[in-house]
């Protein structure tokens, strides 16, 4: 199968994952390199384990202020252009005769904003996508519930809808971010959303030593609303903290920051080591300015192996693929073993 779309087919993927004790991994992407790294990691795991099929969710935000990924997808910085390109890339990559034939890929529209993404949410044909997060969490709670319920009533028969019970706040500010309560989650569930983001202690940021994922709260909420929780901000806590997610009623877990944050150092190191190949004679100027140290090969001649976009992207691709592989192993092997 190629890209999984249509409400029934997508919900069937969630049911199949639950039968395995799997929390579905949802990787954020804002370029072809990231999408392909995640697809390759999934294809590889399926081949290694002898699985015919493996599910994988790719996601991008639209105009979400924290990270407008459809805007960033294209240098035109137009969200509609970026979104169409991302969809086309993933449709091509997931063709049955393409390079990742074992992957049942779903494309999720993440953090679609009730106000700035209104054109998408109201006017676009959503059938090429697998699910959408309707995010009205910046509104007061009662208004969030009302707006989300209206969206579910309008489009919930077409597409799987994720709602945001609480806002997941941004990196490091002084904002107060109270955890979701069971009562609030119960009220939010009445909107009719299929999936629900609750504040379980994580944040949208790279890392923070003080943050803790509250599995006990997730279990208390899912006892009341059923197993339909989505965890955002998984990069903000240590990987060991999010091992037993399925047991806590978390059916989907979003990761993006770690892919970018942890693949970047290898690129910097490779370019610094081979500064001449990457930058030609400019490398010597960087040495003289004290930017590059003695181990940097500034005398090498410029080479396509280092001075091209393809070369740089491939270093990032390798890093992202390794990171995605670790997450997939965590959720498809280790977590499932814990649940079993
Ligand atoms: Zn998020």
Image: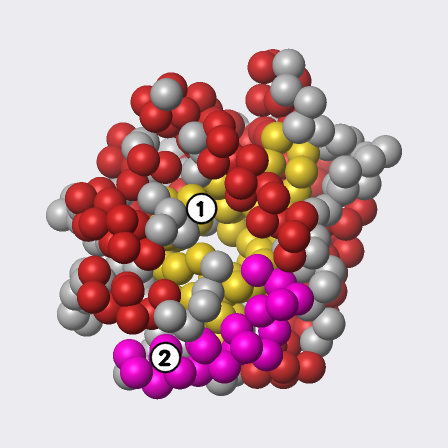
What's drawn in magenta, residue-wise? 141-160
In percent of width and height, residue 118 lies at 57, 83
Which of the pair 117/51 is nearer the observer?
Answer: 51
Query: Quadrant where the N terminus lies?
Result: top right
Q: Residue at x 35, y 85 (%)?
A: 143
Left or right position of 210 against 155:
left
Q: Is residue 95 above or below residue 330?
A: below
The residue that label 2 is drawn on is 144
Give the residue drawn at x 70%, y 53%: 5
Q: Earlier in the sequence, mark 1 or mark 2?
A: 2
Residue at left 58%, top 15%? 49
Disc 2 residue crowd, few under 14, some 14–19, many 20+, Cα 10 Å: many
Label ID, residue 149: none
Residue 252's disc is 1
Front-most of 13 and 77?
13
Residue 308 is a magenta residue: no
Decide which of 9, 232 is in the foreground and name it.
9
Q: CA distance from mark 1 to mark 2?
A: 21 Å
In the rendered image, is residue 314 in sight? no
User: For numbered disc 1, what is the local secondary structure?
Assistant: strand
Name the quadrant of the C terminus.
top left
Left or right: 69 as drawn, with respect to 225: right
**Residue with the most extreme right position:** 97
In the image, is residue 219 above or below residue 293? below
Question: Can residue 1 be seen by looking at this rendering?
Answer: yes
Q: Is residue 148 magenta?
A: yes
Please tell me how many numbered marks the rendered image carries: 2
Percent x, y for residue 68? Answer: 51, 68
Q: Hey, which quadrant is residue 70 in on the image?
A: bottom right
Q: Position of residue 190 (x, y in %)?
A: 37, 70
């Amino acid at each position: 199968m190629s890209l999984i779309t249509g409400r029934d087919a997508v919900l069937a993927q969630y049911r199949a994952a639950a039968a395995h004790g799997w929390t579905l991994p949802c990787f954020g992407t804002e370029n072809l390199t990231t999408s392909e790294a995640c697809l390759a990691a999934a294809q590889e795991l399926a081949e290694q384990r002898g699985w015919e099929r493996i599910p994988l969710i790719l996601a991008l935000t639209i105009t979400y202020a924290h990270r407008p990924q459809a805007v960033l997808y294209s240098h035109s910085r137009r969200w509609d252009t970026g979104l169409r390109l991302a969809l086309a890339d993933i449709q091509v990559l997931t063709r049955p005769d393409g390079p990742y034939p074992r992957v049942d890929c779903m494309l999720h529209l993440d953090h679609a904003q009730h106000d700035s993404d209104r054109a998408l949410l109201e006017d676009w044909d959503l059938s090429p996508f697998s699910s959408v997060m309707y995010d009205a969490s910046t509104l007061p709670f009662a208004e969030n519930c009302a707006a989300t319920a209206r969206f579910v009533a309008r489009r919930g028969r077409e597409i799987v809808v994720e709602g945001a019970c609480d806002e997941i706040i941004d990196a490091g500010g002084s904002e107060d971010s109270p955890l979701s309560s069971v009562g609030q989650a119960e009220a939010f569930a009445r909107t009719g959303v299929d999936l629900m983001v609750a504040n379980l202690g994580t944040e949208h940021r790279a890392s923070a030593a003080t943050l803790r994922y509250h599995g006990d709260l997730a279990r208390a909420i899912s006892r009341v609303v059923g197993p339909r929780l989505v965890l955002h901000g998984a990069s903000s806590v240590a990987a060991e903290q999010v091992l037993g997610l399925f047991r806590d009623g978390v059916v989907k877990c979003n990761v993006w920051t770690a892919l970018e944050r942890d693949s970047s150092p290898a690129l910097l190191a490779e370019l610094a080591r081979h500064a001449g190949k990457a930058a030609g004679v400019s490398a010597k100027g960087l040495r003289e300015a004290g930017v590059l140290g003695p181990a940097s090969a500034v005398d090498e001649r410029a080479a396509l192996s280092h001075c091209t976009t393809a070369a740089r992207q491939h270093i990032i691709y390798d890093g992202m693929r390794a990171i995605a592989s670790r997450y997939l192993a965590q959720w498809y092997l280790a977590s499932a073993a814990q649940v079993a």
